[in-house]
Amino acid sequence: MALFRIDKFLADMGCGTRSEVKNYIKKGRVAINGLVVNAPEHKIDTNLDRVSLDGADINYLEYEYYMLNKPQGVVSATDDKRDRTVIDLIETKNRKDLFPVGRLDKDTEGLLLITNDGQLAHNLLSPKKHVDKVYYARVDGIVTKEIVEQFKEGIILSDGTLTRPAHLNVLETNPSESTVELTIHEGKFHQVKRMFEACGMTVMYLKRLRMGTLILDKELKPGEYRRLTQEETERLKKEDR
Ligand code: URA
């Protein structure tokens, strides 16, 4: 049983701000099981009660899960004074409490999970779980066999910390740059850029392709998103145990 104040329920379901929905209630636009309610503090049971606004049913949605192909130039935050955030991009959201699971830098593209499921996020980000992340990167210079070996051993970052072993797959090299696919098993701040920096190289382009079992949908252009399928959600939840 989940009991909620009717004004909180309506605001959480994206019907308006808390003060807007209070106004709707005062104006008699909200009904519970067909009876108009006038008190914003009235409690409803989401399993039993049917709520409507202007005659349209408002269904309870506890969690939302979105896969976003994050474009460059937006920040991985819930709100920001200067920049657009990844949450601003999710136009079809119902819940007001969505957040990105982990961060991608402003200039990084690719897979970002957006949800309000705090337990799932906590487990996916837990350093103990070592959920793997796969990145596509373009770096300046040539990624040699020695560098691939160093990544396999773990890289000592400029602050002296040693990363966990990482798998570096060189896709292409030319005299001035290399493209690689990199798998890491942790999520330190700016980790990929710092790993290459420690080898004297600069990451020029970075895109996340996978996080655990969740693979970026190739159909999504930067800035586009979709809801996770039930199968994707269930696989992620299994992974986090
Ligand atoms: N590593 C980085 O350096 N940046 C990101 O955005 C993600 C991983």
Image (tube, helix red, strand yellow):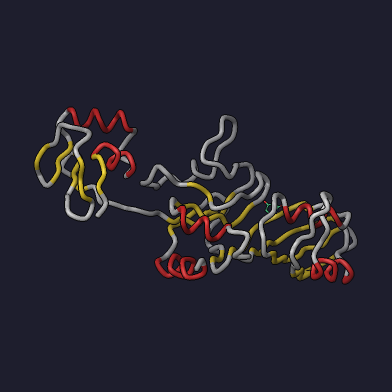
- How many numbered marks have been drawn onto this rendered protein structure? 0
Residue 8 drawn above or below residue 230: above
The residue at 79%/59% (across/down) is 162
Asked if residue 228 lies left or right of residue 204, the reply is: left
In the image shown, does 42 or 174 lie closer to the viewer? 42
The furthest residue to the left: 35
The residue at 69%/53% (across/down) is 188
Residue 24 drawn above or below residue 211: above
Instruction: Residue 192 in the image: state x and y as whole percent.
Output: 74, 56
Which image quarter holds the N terminus?
bottom left
Q: Quadrant of residue 38?
A: top left
The residue at 26%/44% (across/down) is 4
In the image shown, does 198 or 226 lie closer to the viewer? 198
Instruction: Residue 57 in the image: state x and y as whole percent.
Output: 20, 48
In the image shown, does 46 or 115 lie closer to the viewer? 46
Asked if residue 2 lies left or right of residue 114, the reply is: left
In the image shown, does 183 or 49 lie closer to the viewer? 49
Asked if residue 5 lies left or right of residue 62, the reply is: left
Instruction: Residue 193 in the image: state x and y as whole percent.
Output: 76, 53
Instruction: Residue 173 in the image: state x and y as whole percent.
Output: 84, 66
Residue 192 drawn above or below residue 14: below
Asked if residue 67 lies left or right of residue 197, the reply is: left
The furthest residue to the front: 128
